[in-house]
Amino acid sequence: MPRAKRTLISQEEGSYHIISRINKKHTLFDEVEKEYLFNLLSLFASGFYVQIHAYSIMSTHFHILVTTQDIEAKEASGEELLRRYRLMYGERANPPTGSAKTYGCFKVDEDGGIERLRNRLGSISRFVQELKQTFSTWYNKRHGLKGYLWHDRFKGIVLDKGEAQLVCSAYIDLNPVRADLVRRPEHYRWSSLGLRLRDAKQADELLIHCEGDLPWYRQFVYSCGGVEREGKHKIDPHIIDEVIKVQGRLGIGERLRYRVKNISEGMAIGSHSFISEIQRRYNRKFIRPRPFFNTNLLFSTRVLKAKR
């Protein structure tokens, strides 16, 4: 039977809850693979006309709540479309200007491929396709595998604006708790709530703002996490009471703990000279240090990337 056509909605109507799972024959994603998939999500979100509300990268699947920016895509200039394309594929990359026809002929579009590129970057299906295919190629090469990594095509659930988006965001951020991977949703590194509390700057670049504000949204997520779901874990009532008592806000101790937690995730924290020495000693690519915990005494930076 032919596949049913996807329901397409505009940004003024609502969003999509994207879900995609891997084939059962493949191994669970490890930390390196989750991080790589997250980096791809950030990369393609910078080029395609999409807005990410929430995401969660699990060991066998991922969730993304996304709204297309179809209005912006329709109004974009050719220069802007090309800029976005090269953000993803390199500053010298050029998109197709036409289509291949029979007998090896190539037919150039009358507008030089502008409308073709506009349709590509404004397509939610193409966005997810690029994400999955790029990751699949890398994953199979890493494990010496061939064939399909993902189980069939992705699921795209259409959501109304407002409350439906809010509830779905909480559902996505609670996935690691429901799977008993963490006790608190923000403790999970590869989720939107974890990113919002761990790295506000990166979260602002990737995610749209929370409904209301972050403390209110965090309190809402915890309240949802206390609801019983058959066969799933929930947040401890005492933890929920703690969060509600402070109205979802993080105290100075908690904020420091989340920043210090990054030490085990490829961070270096200290003076400029200390960071430079660590980067030199381990032959790491230089990344400019940033003030750590709003002070001018300590700095932090990633040191995972090796020099090329």
Image (cartoon, rainbow, N blue to C red):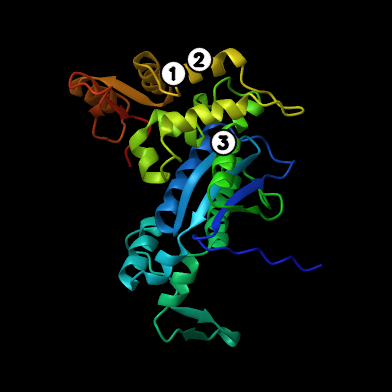
Please say whether residue 278 is visible from this viewpoint.
yes
Q: In the rendered view, would you say 228 is above or below 51?
A: above
Q: Where is residue 146 in the image (x, y as percent from the top left)?
A: 66, 50
Give the residue number, with chain letter if any, for mark 1.
Answer: 246
Quadrant where the N terminus lies?
A: bottom right
Element at label 1: loop
Do the residues under discs 1 and 2 have CB atoms within 8 angstroms? yes
Residue 242 is marked as: 2
Rounded to the nearest whole Å, what is the CA distance between mark 3 and mark 1?
Answer: 19 Å
Residue found at x 37% / y 20%: 255
Which of the two discs, 3 and 1, labels the residue nearer the N terminus?
Answer: 3
Indicate the amino acid at tag 3.
Answer: Ala
Q: How crowded is mark 3: few (under 14 residues within 10 Å), some or many (20 or more)?
A: many
Q: What residue type is labelled 2?
A: Glu
- The one nearer the camera, 9 or 293, is 9
- Which quadrant: the C terminus? top left
SS under mark 3: helix
Other residues around mark 2 within 10 Å, as few (<14) / some (14–19) / many (≥20): few
Residue 47, image x, y percentages: 41, 57
User: Residue 232: x percent and y percent?
Assistant: 71, 27
